[in-house]
C-alpha cells in the first residue's frame, strides 16, 4: 500500500475509533437507546473496516524476497491479523447472540466498555502486525540485495 493511501486509511481508522469513543461516553452517561444503537452501529463499522484494512495489505507474492524467510514473515502477519479479527468477530457475535436471550446486554455499561477496549486492542494489534511485517520485509530486502541507506 502506498504511503498516501496508508495515511488515509489510518486517519479513517482514528476517526472511527474517536466516534466510537464518543458514542460510548454518550451512551453511558445519557443512557438513551439512540446512543446505544449508534454505538453498536459504529462497532459493526469498525469490524468491517478492520477486515477491509487487513484485506488491503494482502498482496499475493509481494513479500517473496527470500522464499523461506518471506513465508515466515507472511505467516506471522496472517496469524496475528486473523486471530485479532476472529476474536473481535466472535466477541461481537457473542454479544449479539446473548441479546436474543437478554435484551439488556447491549445496554450494559460493562459490556459496552469491554467491547470498546477489546476492539481498540484489536486495532492496535493489527497495526502492530502490519508495521512489523513491513519492517521485517525491509530488513530482509536490505540484507538480500545489500542495500544501505
Image (spheres, rainbow, N blue to C red):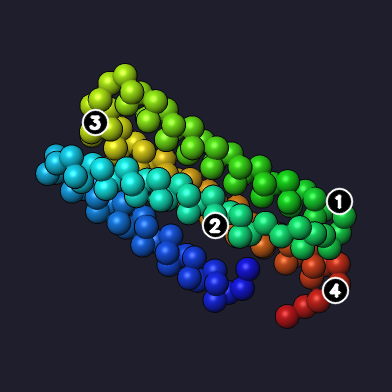
Q: Nearer the viewer, mark 4 or mark 3?
A: 3
For marks 3 and 2 on the same chain, the one whose residue lies earlier in the sequence:
2
For marks 4 and 3 on the same chain, the one whose residue lies earlier in the sequence:
3
* Real-space Cα separation, disc 3 to disc 2, in angstroms: 29 Å
* Real-space Cα separation, disc 1 to disc 2, in angstroms: 26 Å
Q: Nearer the viewer, mark 1 or mark 2?
A: 2
* Real-space Cα separation, disc 1 to disc 4, in angstroms: 18 Å
Q: Which residue is mark 1?
A: 68
Q: Which residue is mark 4?
A: 146
Could you say where residue 68 lies in the image, as x and y percent from the top left?
86, 51
- Crowding at mark 4 (Cα within 10 Å: few <14, some 14-19, many 20+): few
Q: Is residue 17 visible?
A: yes
Quarter holding residue 55 = bottom right
Q: Which residue is mark 2?
A: 53
Could you say where residue 15 lies in the image, as x and y percent from the top left?
36, 62
Q: Quadrant of the C terminus?
A: bottom right
- Crowding at mark 2 (Cα within 10 Å: few <14, some 14-19, many 20+): some
97 in relation to 37, above or below: above
67 in relation to 9, above or below: above
Identify the residue at the far top of this view.
101
Q: Is residue 109 left or right of residue 134?
A: left
Q: Is residue 4 left or right of residue 27?
A: right
Q: Secondary structure at mark 3?
A: loop
Q: Which residue is mark 3?
A: 108
Q: Secondary structure at mark 2?
A: helix
* Real-space Cα separation, disc 4 to disc 3, in angstroms: 56 Å
Return the residue nearer the eye: 138 or 95: 95
Amino acid at each position: 500500500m502506498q504511503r498516501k493511501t496508508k495515511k488515509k486509511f489510518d486517519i479513517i481508522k482514528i476517526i472511527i475509533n474517536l466516534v466510537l469513543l464518543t458514542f460510548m461516553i454518550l451512551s453511558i452517561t445519557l443512557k438513551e437507546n439512540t446512543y446505544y444503537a449508534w454505538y453498536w452501529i459504529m462497532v459493526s463499522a469498525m469490524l468491517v473496516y478492520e477486515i477491509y484494512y487487513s484485506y488491503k495489505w494482502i498482496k499475493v507474492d509481494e513479500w517473496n524476497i527470500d522464499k523461506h524467510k518471506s513465508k515466515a514473515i507472511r505467516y506471522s502477519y496472517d496469524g496475528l491479523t486473523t486471530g485479532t479479527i476472529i476474536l473481535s468477530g466472535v466477541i461481537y457475535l457473542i454479544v449479539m447472540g446473548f441479546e436474543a436471550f437478554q435484551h439488556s446486554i447491549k445496554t450494559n455499561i460493562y459490556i459496552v466498555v469491554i467491547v470498546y477496549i477489546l476492539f481498540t486492542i484489536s486495532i492496535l494489534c493489527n497495526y502492530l502486525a502490519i508495521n512489523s511485517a513491513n519492517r521485517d520485509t525491509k530488513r530482509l530486502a536490505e540484507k538480500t540485495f545489500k542495500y544501505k541507506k
